[in-house]
Amino acid sequence: MSDFEYTETAVQGLLKPKFIDTQLRGMTGPWSHGHGAITMKDYPDYRRVLTQARASGIQFRKATVQASLWGAEKTYTFFYRDPWEWIRGLVTDPSLAHVTAWKSRRMFYCEDGGRERFITEPWTANRWYEVDMELPTPNPYPNCWLPLHIWLDKGLITKHVKMFPIVLRPLWLPSEIRNASGNGGGVFLGFMVKDPGNPKDRTEKENYEFAQFRREVYQQVLEIIFSSLYERSWRGEVVTCGDDVPRVLYPGFLIESLDFEEAWNFTCCRSGRAKFPCPRCLVSQEMLHCLRRTFEARTSSGMRAVVRRAQNTSSATQKEKILMNHGLHDVVHFMWNFRFSDPYQAVSYDLLHFDESGKWGHHLWPLILDLLEELRLLRQLIPPKSPLIHCCRTLLQFRMMGGLKGMTDSRIEVINNFISTYEYWCTKVSEVYGKNFRFPKQHFVVHAVQDILSKGVLRNATTRTGEGFHQEIAQHYTKTNCREAEGQIAGEDEDQEVVARARLIIDDFFRHLQGEDSGRRIPKSKIPPASRDNHWIFGSALRRGDSRSYEDLYAAGDPVYKSFDPRLRDFLHNAFPSEYLTQEDTIEIEIFRCVYITFQCKDDWTECEDILRCNNNWYNSGPRRPWPRLRTSAFARSLQLPSGRIVDLAIVQTMRKSGWHPRTAWDGCAVYDEEKNFSFLLMDYVIRGALLVLVRPSPPSHSRSRLHFFVDVVDGDMFLRALNATNHVCY
């Protein structure tokens, strides 16, 4: 164990070879007088152990591709892993067998006699079901589709170095497993080759030729990487899986998580200024702003026929016209010959690049900044009922619905309504401010609902999980000599993987040796609940005493503890008349500053936890008080009532709905006025915390009031709770 633990520390700590060598020589020599537990004596020993261990993992291979650009032959070398070796390791892993989805499923949400289809993971959506219907019946083994999620994107590793990792994820495993870095998570397949830069001084023809060259290189690299999957996508392969059941497995591609630049490169389509710029459909440049129209879909068979027709044309002009009218380059796509895989329909809606950094970050937010600067110069405010505010709000509503973990029929209906409303307000913004919404990321809203129905909720396809991988590559890069770093990074990743796998095996061994403890453990920072039926647990105990002492302990002007004892007695008498609480009875209470609330999430109906904290001086930045639709100043537990009852309370400041509204009241706008007095509330009535933002500056008509906007977009659960209080009701 000592050798392994040191190796694990060195690999995870990214130690340089010279430091490892110095430490090993010291620990096996003069530092321990030759009596150390580590058997590795120097860096060569350390390296030899890791090299032997690498053989148990999936090792990188080396390959080259060639392509011609302007009469010069370009040769590129790259490193990659065999994806089938990785797939085989996952499906034969016994620890993953019980969470693996071998077949598609239909899920329904039932309430009050009604039933709605419920979509979450890819195996609950349509495309997987359609593939299952195409697969042959068991003869003798069951046939199973293994859909894949591919992500690739270039990113900055240092201020001046960009790299282009490719990551593959298994869509037959739950999202919390496949999106993590442990067993069952995504695999780093290798790097896409880096082509020479594209200077801006090139002519339009040279830019087109360079784009053609880049896509040719893409396809050659991807064809080599995924060559082991092609035959298996058609005939399958029998594998005895982790549950000891032999199955015929067919790999395929369901989701491609790409930003638009990589989507154009990956699908061999022309870019944003093309006549038909969408990698999913044949929408024309003039119709990109139309969000309620349907357009002819791109398919493997259709685009292959177009490229073949263009290649068979003798006239170069006619060939270019055919390709231009379909937004294509003259490149054969590696995925055309795969079964159950379509490179165009697999391009998926990405909330990060299409909404957050796309429509908002690159379009609406810059428009707002320009407008604010113009109004500042004119000393004016944004006009009342501005369409820009409504446009931003509707986009935010669409983003919140699109980011839900579960999707029902009624929620999809609400999304369609938001899309229609968003299109309407975009039209108004164009009329008032001259904004042009004819850009591809705006158009891709057309495909959002279809992606949900075909592949599961949109978070399945987000690039957010992949973007963080650049940080891991950056860590590996620090151990290279900064020259031809791809091969060195591949070796570092092999070391990380073999150490992580060994740690998993060791931890599993000791867990089984010691026995599993499945009981719920309450962390030391939490106070055990008064009843096991409670959905809350207190934490961060402040003090304990009787109710009469609290007013004396705190400042006389503190409204929280003013007349604390009589107010508490009145509340308990009204809440529990049978207690017969007299003035002579002492009420022992304990004050807490934190509560952990368990509630059922409206998003996917799973159990969630909210943490509410109260502090009069939170990190020297003033009071911190959460809002369970009330302003909470403290939590209290009465320790002794005459009957022995234990009562958990929250000391709250009530918020009431205000009659004031902003100049532009957006859909779902809710304003609350803060009551001056504090009161008590039974914890039984607290569901979860909420976020309210102080209105600044205070309106002249309410200068003495403290008005707050209710923020309904903190998460999907809160958004649905607020949404169901409006006209947009959905399960």
Image (tube, grey):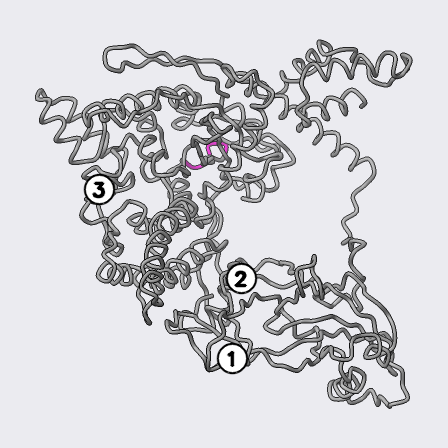
Would you call the spot at circle 2 few (<14 residues within 10 Å), some (14-19), or many (20 or more)?
many
Would you call the spot at circle 3 few (<14 residues within 10 Å), some (14-19), or many (20 or more)?
some
Alpha-carbon span between mark 1 and mark 3:
56 Å
State left or right for residue 108 relative to residue 201.
right
Q: In x, y percent, where is residue 301?
A: 25, 33
Residue positioned 74% across, 13% down in the render: 21
Q: From this viewpoint, is residue 342 visible?
A: no
Q: Identify the residue under disc 1.
A: 703
Q: Identify the residue under disc 2.
A: 717
Please say whether residue 185 is one of the residues in the magenta stretch: no
Looking at the picture, which amino acid does disc 3 mark? Leu
Q: In x, y percent, where is residue 29?
A: 86, 11
Looking at the picture, which amino acid does disc 2 mark? Asp
Q: What element carries label 2?
A: helix
Residue positioned 53% across, 64% down in the render: 718
Q: Identify the residue under disc 3.
A: 282
* Displayed quadrant of residue 420: bottom left
Q: Give the range drawn in magenta.
A: 136-141
Instruction: Compare marks 3 and 2 and give the one earlier in the sequence.
Output: 3
